[in-house]
Each structure stands twice: as structure tokens, then as C-alpha cells.
Amino acid sequence: MCAGREGGRGESAVDDGEIRYTEATKYDAIRKHAHKVWQAGPLSKVKIRADSATTVNDLEWWDYKKKDGHGGYYEQRTLPAATDYLYLNKHYLEPPGELSKLGFQQSVAAHELGHALGLCHKADRVFSLMWTSVASPPVTGPTGVDKSNYKKIWG
């Protein structure tokens, strides 16, 4: 994830100004939250839409369960026309998991979708949804820094 220090278009799931997605996640509400916060106002340059029979799937949302220290992760596949994956970890997101409260779940989903949009982790000294760890209280949507980085990538 984010092999380049700054992230960018080449580090994203975006294809022709949009992310077409499918989902096989039980966390539909937090997936919808992530889509909503990354589509608000000036963050609507990249359209996030469900895949259809006539479009190419860019991103799939999946669940997994593993004690690996991550609430979720984004996997970019660099092969031509390959579908990227966004995983949400049931081990931490379900009770009694440490991220099982709604705000923490929303933070994980929005953070991972940020990676699919080309954003990288930010240092903890900069207030950001893209911190490597979920903040307490959780940041559930893009901060000013995240919006600025989005604008640098997508205009």
C-alpha cells in the first residue's frame, strides 16, 4: 500500500475518474458511510458507484477474520484490469473486538477507502483519518489534511 511516499493516482483503484465496486461484506452500513464521506462536496471528483453488467469492477469489499493488528487493509493489484480488494477484519470490528463500536468501524472503512483513492498514511502529529492507527475518539471522515491531499491527487 502506497509504495510511493505520497501516494497518488497510480496507488489507487480509480479508473476513468471512478471506482466501480462490488461488496461481499456484512458491514454494509460502514461501507456506505465511507462512500458518503469521500463523496461530500469537493471530494466528489472521483465517483464511487456500484458495479454493473456493463462496467469494469475496480474494487471489491471483503471480510476476513485474523488477529493481525489491523482493522482492515487495502490491497492494490497492479496487473492490467485487475480488481483491487478492500478487507474489513471481523476479529476487531465485532464485539468484543477493540474496534467494535460504530465510530471506530466507520473510521476503519473510511480510512481503507482513502487508500483506494490513492491516499497514504500520515504521521500521528498531523490530524488525519489516514493515521496508521484509529484515533480515540475516532476520526470518521476526511480531515482538512486528507481533503487537501485528495485535491492534490484528483483536483
Image (cartoon, rainbow, N blue to C red):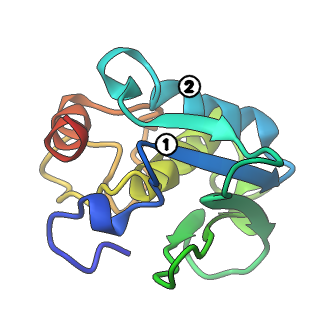
Quadrant where the image shows the C terminus = top left
Q: Distance between the residues labelled 1 and 2?
A: 14 Å
Which residue does the image show at 20% across and 47% down from the upper left? 153
Q: Mark 1 or mark 2, which has the lower sequence index? A: 1
The residue indicated by pointer 2 is 36
Residue placed most toward the observer, 102 or 9: 9
**Spot occupied by residue 139 in the image (x, y as percentages of width and height):** 41, 35
**Of labels 1 and 2, the one closer to you:** 1
Give left or right: position of 46 versus 81: left
**Spot occupied by residue 110 in the image (x, y as percentages of width and height):** 51, 43
Q: What element carries label 2?
A: helix
Quadrant where the image shows the N terminus = bottom left
- Disc 1 marks a residue whose amino acid type is Glu
Which residue does the image show at 49% across and 74% down from the upper left? 76
Which residue does the image show at 36% across and 14% down from the upper left? 41
The residue indicated by pointer 1 is 18
Question: Relative to 142, does residue 2 appear above or below in the rendering?
Answer: below
The answer to whether the residue labelled 1 contacts the one labelled 2, judged by CB atoms less than 8 Å apart, is no
Give left or right: position of 28 versus 55: right
Give the crowd class for mark 1: few <14, some 14-19, many >=20 residues within 10 Å: some
- Disc 2 marks a residue whose amino acid type is Lys
Looking at the image, the residue that sits furthest to the top is 41
**Spot occupied by residue 125 in the image (x, y as percentages of width and height):** 12, 51
Give the crowd class for mark 2: few <14, some 14-19, many >=20 residues within 10 Å: some
Give left or right: position of 107 versus 6: right
Question: Relative to 154, does residue 84 appear above or below in the rendering?
Answer: below
Give left or right: position of 42 versus 1: left
Which residue does the image show at 46% across and 82% down from the upper left? 78
Asked whether residue 95 appears in the rendered view, the answer is no
**Spot occupied by residue 67 in the image (x, y as percentages of width and height):** 68, 80
Residue placed most toward the observer, 6 or 90: 6
Q: Is mark 1 on a helix, strand or loop?
A: strand
